[in-house]
Image (spheres, rainbow, N blue to C red):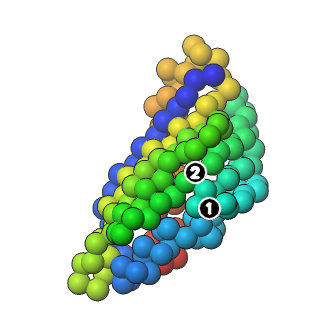
Amino acid sequence: MPWFEGTHTESRTVAKPIDAVRAAFASPDRILANTKNIEASSVDDGVIHFVMKEEDHGVVKFKGEFRCRYTLDGNTLRWETVGDGNMKQSGEATFSDDGGETKVDYTETVEVDLPVPGMMAPMLKPVISALLANEIKEYVKRVAASA
């Protein structure tokens, strides 16, 4: 099955102190609370196991499952998929104090292994890439608002 990828990069200023914003983005509870369509999850030593609800898009049905390790090192949060799964997620968020507010430089890539015929993949890649990038953008908005 073909893999599809979407990436989103942005810089945003959050009107909260750096400690609050960094904590919101790095907290497994906040990550899970701000991720849509989770059916089940667990957290073990910085690794979140995500089991997503099945999505039915007519031609394609997809139920994502993956594990992702989050590591906060000072003012930089990094994450990457560990182990097997039909989704992959990786990225980095850097936090800097901006006069009592917090500047967040954020980039993330999500990949999904979709059960579509290989000859349909070239037509679907731009559409799915845009959908994935938009989901990442909306996730960043939700986490920032929860800080």
The residue pinned by badge 1 equals 45
**Any part of residue 36 in sight:** no
The location of residue 85, given as percent across then percent down, is: 65, 38
Residue 12 appears anywhere in the view: yes
Determine the residue positioned at 47% across, 60% down: 71
The residue sitting at 76% across, 56% down in the picture is 40
Q: Amino acid at mark 2?
A: Cys
The residue lying at 71 percent from left, 49 percent from top is 52
Q: Secondary structure at mark 1?
A: loop
- Which residue is identified by label 2? 68
Front disc: 2 or 1: 1
Residue at x 72% of width, y 58% of height: 41
Can you say whether 126 is above or below 35 in the image? above
Query: Secondary structure under badge 2?
Result: strand
Sooner in the amino-acid sequence: mark 2 or mark 1: 1
When the figure is inspected, residue 45 is found, relative to residue 97, above or below; the finding is above
